[in-house]
Image (cartoon, rainbow, N blue to C red):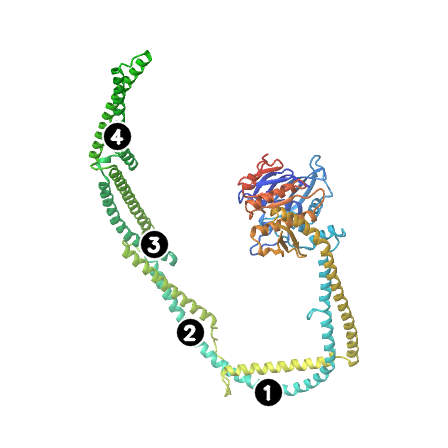
């Protein structure tokens, strides 16, 4: 199956479209752009929305989580290719069931496809139920790890063994354990119930004789207890009449206290409202805090003014110290450049002229000596003598020019040193350094002055803001408050009055509750019986209650004993019931032993089944792990509970996930996921693989290896890789067989080839 195009009104997606291609589709988008929502939309279009899920702490049900943000109904459209046929899947609201309305039509003709329904579309197209799809070809965000399920176990077991998917070993084991528990599970099993029944039947005969004795003893005790009850009733009436007099006195006193509390409460309430409505305590406390802030700001403002004056003086002094007529109007860099040029002029070497003078004199002497000796025999000899004479003259002239240049350089050097008032070039550079340091100090002082000025302005603004907040609010209930002292006094007084008002209200509420609890006295007091009570009122009532309780208990005991004597029946019938229960117990114990043997056999069968399907899954996962880790890990072990372990190429023992790094653990999970996907969904019309940020914890090296694996798997099935990073796209930028699909921050999708 291949997904061609999707349009969704689903969660944050507002009638947005995503087009996909064959092979590996790299869908890049920033966080909150809708990647996970598109993944959930694919699953919902295929398998619907679970309607029985409910929100709970830390979890939002899908039907609520993906309600469209714009308030419209949840709708979706998916165009797919399946078995060479183009099909369009449509889902929308069905009354109150999200995505409950489903329709599948031929994309070209629009004809309905009745064999695809809302209940079977996912399992028909994918080739597996929802729980298998979620544990194989659907990797949600942060859910790379694989856990087991009966459906997935049946699927993998069938594909690598008999090919049947009717039942799983876990289901059979669970059923046998249910049968075993039904026969013997604490007090709820059949065997404990039968054992209890036999115990009860054995005790039935004993209860018959005991019931007869109990009835006789109860009749003897009841006569004396009834006489004591009548005496206590008269004594209690005496105590009640006396207590009624006390209640009347207490009720009248409570009424008086209530009146006083109400008057006191009204007094404080009127005091608070005398000059205006006083805000509540929380507002007053915040205002008091703001008033304290205003005082602190005013203190800081005084210090800021002193700091500002000091900063002005420091800046002026720094500017004066930084001024230097040698570098007037120059920046530090310009002064430094000028000083370097002048230092270079001072250090310039004078040209050497002694060698030139000696050479010229030698040439002239040679030419004159030759002429004096008469060595002019040929034209060539005459020419040589002339050349010697000319060369000597040129050298003498050059020597004169070099001496003049040396004199000029010396004059310029003396002029520069005199201007700076120094003796060498190093002192010139030192003056430039001092100028730069002074200039930087002046600028630093100016920045400090500006900062002090800004601090002063900010404090003044803060003072005005606090005044604007505090003054109108306080003057609303204390018009005479003007300055900080009177403002604070007004707030303190209001807080004091509110506290007194609350205390008065508490006293009033307590008095009201007391009045409510105290019953109104009777208009005509009952006559006090003429009796001398033996005990106080409390003990008399307790004793009377105990006697009545004992009478009631003995009446119940007598009734139960008499009833038990009638209901226990014939002892022969009790014996017959006992024999039947013993026979049934023996049968249940035989069944219990048989089921126990069956469980042991099933455990052996499960080990045999694991020996069949585990190698196939482990082998494929190991191959993928080797490719994902660049050959470092080449073996994977997956238990029947889908706990994965990896072994290094030269390692001694497999390593559990908890001992691996986060990146390696995710590589292992991804290898197992891909292997499970291939084994659970190996159809030629392979289901698409959906990966939501599955490479988020991979470094660049792991990411490249994983992309190479996914790219190769993309030749066999469509893969949707959602990512929030750009590195995957950069690595696959030149891959001709990869579809690059960016999503905007609004969740819009488009293909980029």
Residue drawn at x 57%, y 82% as measured from the top left: 546
Q: Would residue 515 be found to the left or right of residue 328 on screen?
A: right
In this rendering, is residue 297 above or below 187?
A: above
Question: In which quarter of the view is residue 555 placed?
Answer: bottom right
Q: Which residue in the protein does label 2 denote?
A: 252
Q: Which residue in the protein does label 4 denote?
A: 350
Q: Which residue in the protein does label 1 denote?
A: 227
Q: Position of residue 159 (x, y in %)?
A: 73, 50
> Quick one: quadrant of the N terminus?
top right
Q: Position of residue 461 (x, y in %)?
A: 31, 47
> Quick one: quadrant of the C terminus?
top right
Q: Which residue in the protein does label 3 denote?
A: 290
The residues bearing labels 3 and 4 have C-alpha atoms spaced at a distance of: 79 Å
In primary-sequence order, the first of circles 1 and 4 is 1
The residues bearing labels 3 and 2 have C-alpha atoms spaced at a distance of: 49 Å
Mark nearer the viewer, 3 or 1: 3
Give the tally of numbered discs: 4
Q: Would residue 45 be found to the left or right of residue 391 on screen?
A: right
Disc 2 crowd, CA 10 A, few/some/many (<14, 14-19, 20+): some
Q: Are marks 4 and 2 in contact (CB under 8 Å)?
A: no
């Amino acid at each position: 199956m291949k997904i061609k195009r999707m349009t969704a009104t689903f969660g944050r997606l507002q009638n947005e479209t995503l087009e996909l291609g064959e092979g590996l589709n790299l869908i890049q988008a920033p966080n909150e752009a809708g990647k996970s929502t598109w993944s959930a939309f694919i699953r919902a279009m295929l398998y619907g929305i679970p309607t029985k899920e409910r929100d709970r702490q830390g979890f939002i049900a899908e039907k609520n989580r993906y309600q469209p943000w714009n308030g419209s109904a949840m709708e979706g459209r998916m165009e797919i290719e399946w078995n060479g046929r183009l099909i369009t899947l449509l889902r929308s609201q069905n009354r109150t069931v999200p995505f409950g309305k489903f329709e599948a039509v031929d994309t070209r003709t629009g004809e309905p496809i009745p064999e695809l329904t809302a209940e079977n579309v996912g399992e028909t197209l994918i080739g597996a139920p929802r729980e298998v799809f979620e544990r194989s070809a659907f990797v949600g965000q942060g859910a790379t790890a694989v856990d087991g399920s009966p459906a997935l176990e049946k699927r993998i077991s069938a594909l690598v063994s008999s090919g049947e998917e009717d039942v799983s070993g876990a289901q059979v084991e669970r059923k046998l354990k249910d049968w075993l528990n039904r026969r013997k599970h604490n007090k709820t099993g059949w065997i404990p119930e039968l054992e209890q029944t036999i115990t009860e039947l054995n005790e039935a005969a004993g209860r018959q004789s005991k019931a007869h004795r109990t009835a006789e003893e109860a009749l003897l005790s009841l006569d004396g207890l009834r006489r004591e009850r009548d005496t206590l009733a008269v004594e209690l009436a005496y105590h009640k009449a006396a207590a009624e007099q006390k209640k009347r006195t207490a009720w009248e006193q409570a009424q008086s206290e209530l009146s006083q509390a109400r008057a006191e409460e009204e007094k404080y309430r009127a005091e608070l409202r005398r000059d205006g409505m006083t805000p509540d305590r929380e507002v007053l406390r915040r205002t008091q805090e703001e008033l304290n802030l205003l005082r602190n700001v005013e203190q800081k403002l005084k210090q800021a003014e002193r700091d500002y004056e000091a900063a002005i003086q420091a800046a002026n002094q720094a500017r004066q110290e930084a001024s230097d007529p040698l570098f007037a109007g120059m920046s530090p860099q310009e002064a430094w450049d000028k000083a370097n040029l002048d230092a270079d002029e001072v250090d310039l070497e004078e040209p050497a002229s002694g060698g030139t003078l000696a050479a010229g004199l030698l040439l002239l002497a040679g030419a004159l000596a030759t002429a004096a000796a008469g060595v002019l025999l040929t034209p060539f000899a005459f020419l040589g003598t002339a050349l010697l004479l000319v060369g000597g003259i040129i050298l003498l002239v050059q020597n004169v020019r070099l001496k003049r240049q040396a004199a000029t350089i010396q004059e310029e050097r003396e002029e520069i040193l005199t201007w700076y008032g120094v003796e060498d070039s190093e002192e010139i550079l030192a003056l430039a350094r001092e100028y730069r340091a002074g200039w930087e100090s002046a600028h630093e002082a100016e920045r400090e002055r500006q900062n002090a000025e800004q601090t002063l302005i900010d404090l003044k603004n803060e003072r005005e803001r606090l005044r604007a907040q505090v003054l109108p609010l306080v003057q609303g209930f204390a018009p005479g408050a003007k300055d900080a002292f009177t403002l604070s006094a007004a707030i303190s007084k209001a807080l004091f009055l509110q506290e007194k008002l609350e205390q008065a209200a508490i006293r009033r509420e307590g008095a009201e509750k007391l009045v409510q609890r105290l019953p109104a006295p009777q208009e005509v007091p009952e006559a006090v019986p003429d009796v001398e009570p033996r005990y106080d009122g409390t003990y008399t009532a307790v004793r009377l209650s105990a006697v009545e309780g004992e009478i009631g208990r003995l009446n119940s005991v007598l009734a139960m004993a008499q009833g038990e004597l009638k209901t226990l029946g014939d002892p022969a019938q009790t014996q017959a019931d006992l024999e039947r229960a013993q026979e049934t117990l023996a049968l249940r114990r035989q069944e219990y032993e048989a089921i126990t043997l069956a469980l042991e056999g099933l455990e052996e069968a499960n080990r045999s089944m694991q020996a069949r399907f585990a190698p196939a899954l482990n082998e494929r996962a190991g191959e993928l792990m080797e490719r994902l880790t660049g050959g470092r890990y080449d073996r994977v072990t997956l238990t029947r509970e889908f706990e994965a372990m990896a072994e290094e190429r030269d390692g001694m023992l497999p390593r559990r996930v908890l001992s691996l790094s986060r990146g390696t653990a995710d590589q292992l999970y991804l290898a197992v996921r891909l292997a499970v996907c291939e084994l659970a969904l190996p159809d030629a019309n392979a289901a698409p693989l959906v990966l939501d940020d599955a490479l988020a914890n991979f470094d660049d090296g792991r990411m490249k290896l994983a992309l190479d694996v996914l790219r190769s798997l993309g030749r066999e099935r469509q893969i949707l890789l959602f990512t929030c990073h750009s590195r995957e796209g950069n690595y696959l930028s030149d891959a001709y067989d990869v579809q690059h699909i960016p999503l905007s921050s609004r969740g819009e999708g488009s293909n980029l080839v």
